[in-house]
Structure formats: C-alpha cells, structure tokens
Amino acid sequence: MQSSRQRVVITGAGSGLGRELALRYAREGAQLALADIHDDGLVETLAMVREAGGWGFTQRCDVRDFSQLAALAQSCQERMEGIDVLINNAGVASGGLFWELTLEDWEWQISVNLMGVVKGCKAFVPMLTRQRSGRIINIASMAALMQSPGMSNYNVAKAGVVALSESLLAELKPLGIEVNVACPSFFQTNLLDSYRGPDQASKDQIAKLLQSSPISAAEVAESIYTQSEAGRFMILPHESGRQAWALKQTNPDAVYAEMTRLMEKRLATSTP
C-alpha cells in the first residue's frame, strides 16, 4: 500500500464517482487536485474533502482542451511537487442507434470520453516518468467490454480507454508507473446530467439501468481504491459485470446472440 499522504489528481471531481473517489482518498489523508468544468460542484467537493480529513485545491478544467490539462499538471507540480495518482474520470453519457447518431454526436463523445483520457495521460506522463513512480487510473465502463446495442459511440470511446490503458500498462511499468482501468457497470450517479442522444427512448433506457443498480458511486469508488492499491489492472466493481465478462471470454457467441435478441426486442416494441 502507498503512503496515506498520496498526491492525487482527479478529473470530473465535481460530482458523482469523481467526488466519491476524492472522498475515499481524503479519508486516507491525501492531497487532492480537483478538476471539473462545474465550479459549484468543485466547491462542494473541496468542502467535503476537507471535512473528511484531506487537503486539496480546485481548478477548472475541460479535458477536451489539452492546454487546460497542461495547466493543471503545472499547478500540481507547483502546489504538490508532483503527483502519485492520476485519475482520468471526467466523462459524459450518450446513446442512440447507429443510424440515428450524427457525426457530431460521435465527435463529442470521442472528444470527451476517449481523447480526454488520452490528453490527461499526455499532460501528466512527463511528470510521472521524471519521478519514475506513480499510478494512472483510467475510468472506462463495462460498455467497453459488453457492447450493448443503442450505445455505439459510447461503447467505442470506452473500449478505446481500455486499449489505451493496456498499451500504457506495458509501456510505463518498466519506468515504475502503474496503470489500472476501471470498468463499472451502471451505478447510482448523475451521469444523465451530461446525456446527449437523438431519442428519448435511449435516455429512458439508461435511466432505468441507473435506478435499478444495486451499487452506489461510493461503493464503486471503494472498489477502485482497494483494487488499484492491490495492483489489479482491470477493475470490475460489479459482480454481474465480472460474470458477464467471464461468459464473453469463454463463449462470446452467446453474448453476441443475447445482444442481438435485445436489439430485436427493442425494434419490436418501437414499431407502430
């Protein structure tokens, strides 16, 4: 286990999983750099971090803009003399059938959920390689592993995060830098606040999945913290997710058949 005084930077820290991750590290006495595009949320998270026993500062940061991420890295160097953990958490929700999604929908989704992670790593890897130590935790999704219909742009973006993480695992480990990727299923959070898609049905479907989840954002954060510290590369917080991934590894055709069945059911119910 690392020292309790870890220096941690979290994007998307103004709410949801990012906030819960900040609080989990704060309980260990961490120093936290909290970044988000929502200033009010950052103020609330920082107050909660201090109450939980951590220290921190906030900085507005849009992960689509590399210059803002580079400025965040510079602030971490100046205020914390480096970092021990980078958590690329900022993300947005989207859905819709492939033929309904516009190229703008695709570009927006990729720019945040994939390129935001790429740019976050690009901004901080020079610091980590100079230190010859540290950890990167990238937040992906079970959508990266189990591609449900009606979410193609989200599925692709999150699958890219897994592929990036696998690449960095091999490239950075010899330099003393650990890499983890978390693939939670849907859980109770405010993900729909950022939702973009061409139809209400897709949003309603995701809302049902969020509401029916048996696990909270705090529980997901606990799993990510514990398993990353234990050195597990791919973190699957949900038991159902672990079971589904195991099935796909052993019998992928069964999973493809089930996804097709779900799509047929969706088409049947949407036909006048």
Image (tube, rainbow, N blue to C red):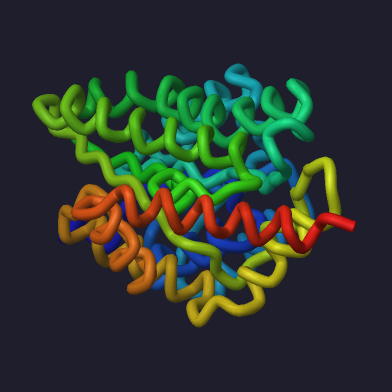
- Counting every numbered tag in the picture gives 0
Q: Is residue 19 visible?
A: yes
* Residue 208 % position (x, y): 69, 72
Q: Is residue 171 above or below residue 146?
A: above
* Residue 84 % position (x, y): 30, 43
- Which quadrant would the N terminus be assigned to in this image? bottom left
Q: Is residue 12 above or below residue 243?
A: above
Q: Name which residue lies at 22% across and 58% down.
A: 229
* Residue 106 % position (x, y): 68, 27
Q: Name which residue lies at 36% across and 35% down.
A: 81
- Which quadrant would the C terminus be assigned to in this image? bottom right
The quadrant in which residue 30 appears is: bottom left
Q: Name which residue lies at 37% across and 52% down.
A: 182
Q: Image check: 24 left or right of 51?
A: left
Q: Name which residue lies at 34% across and 62% down.
A: 244
Q: Is residue 31 visible?
A: no
13 and 258: which is toward the camera: 258
55 and 264: which is toward the camera: 264
Query: Which residue is situated farthest in the right direction here?
Result: 272
Q: Image check: 174 left or right of 128?
A: left
Q: Image check: 131 left or right of 121?
A: left
* Residue 241 % position (x, y): 37, 64
Q: Is residue 2 above or below residue 36?
A: below
96 and 228: which is toward the camera: 96
The quadrant in which residue 184 appears is: bottom left
